[in-house]
Image (cartoon, rainbow, N blue to C red):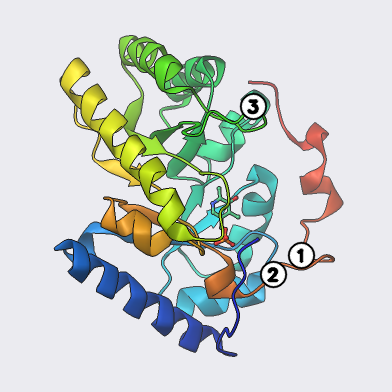
Amino acid sequence: MSNEPDLPSTFSERHAAIEARIRAACERAGRDRGEVVLVGVSKTFPPEIVSEAIRDGVTVLGENRVQEGLAKAPLCPSAEWHLIGPLQRNKIRHALSLFTVLHAIDSEAVLHDLARVQDETGARADVMLEVNVADEPTKHGFTPASVRDALRAALSDGVLRIVGLMCIPPWVPDPELSRPRFRALRALRDALQDEFSLALPELSMGMSSDFETAIEEGATYVRVGTSLFGRRTAGAWKPERSADSDSYFLQP
Ligand SMILES: *Cc1c(COP(=O)(O)O)cnc(C)c1O
């Protein structure tokens, strides 16, 4: 996806480079470094490499598939795991056993089931609603209009902790072109806060190609994969078949 010309060869050098860029973006925006969490997107990378990342101080890992995270996490030192991909209804229980933050909840049906499972099990996660900011037909996420209805329904359930919004804007070669999308997500967040008299402190936006722009526009979580771990390749790490098959998961 992103073209990363000259990635340093060791993890720790790549991490230091990202850290410096995060700090510089925070400074430009007059923000504290502490306001932005780096989510190291470890999907497709094996537990040995993810373990190295954790030992190097990447304490929050992002996976986009429930089964991959569940299979990988026990093989790594302790860390905070976030689900950055969409959650399917039949995987909610399993997701809640590992992930503390769900970045990309994209339907009222999932919100409804999530509330029910949380109610039954007592398990809790922070929830962000994914918004399809560019209105792309092929993408997941609520439209800016439907996110209102979803939020209204979710609030009436009472048990959900909705903490903010997330977006994945269309890939563009120049991160400047993503700026209006990030700005739109923040404006939508501000409007929803007013409308519902509710705090929505978190904005999950920005990836390898555009995380600095996202920070300048108010991101509190940046999800960085390629610039941190290197390019994802075919033949990447996959969980064992047993954990990968759908039969591994219970119905909601
Ligand atoms: C893979 C992924 C990322 C990381 O993308 P990079 O361009 O490799 O940094 C971020 N967010 C989501 C939702 C992803 O699936």
Q: Which residue is mark 2?
A: 46
Disc on res. 60: none
Specify the quadrant that holds the N terminus: bottom right
Q: Are marks 1 and 3 in contact (CB under 8 Å)?
A: no
Q: Quadrant of the C terminus?
A: top right
User: Residue 125: in sight, yes or no?
Assistant: no
Residue occupying image coordinates x 21% and y 17%: 196
Q: Mark 2, mark 3: which one is toward the viewer?
A: 3
Q: Is mark 2 within 8 Å of ligand 1?
A: no
Q: CA distance from mark 1 to mark 3?
A: 30 Å
Element at badge 1? loop
Query: Is residue 130 toward the left or the right of residue 238 in the image?
Result: left
The mark nearer the N terminus, 1 or 3, is 3
Q: Residue at x 36, y 18 (%)?
A: 151
- Badge 3 element: loop
Q: Amino acid at mark 1?
A: Trp
Residue type for callout 2 = Pro
| Distance Cα–Cα, label 2 vs label 3 | 33 Å
Q: How dense is the environment of label 3, judged by Cα within 10 Å: few (below 14), some, or many (20 and up)? A: few
Q: Residues within 10 Å of mark 1 (few under 14, many from 20)?
A: some
Q: Which residue is mark 1?
A: 237
Mark 2 element type: loop
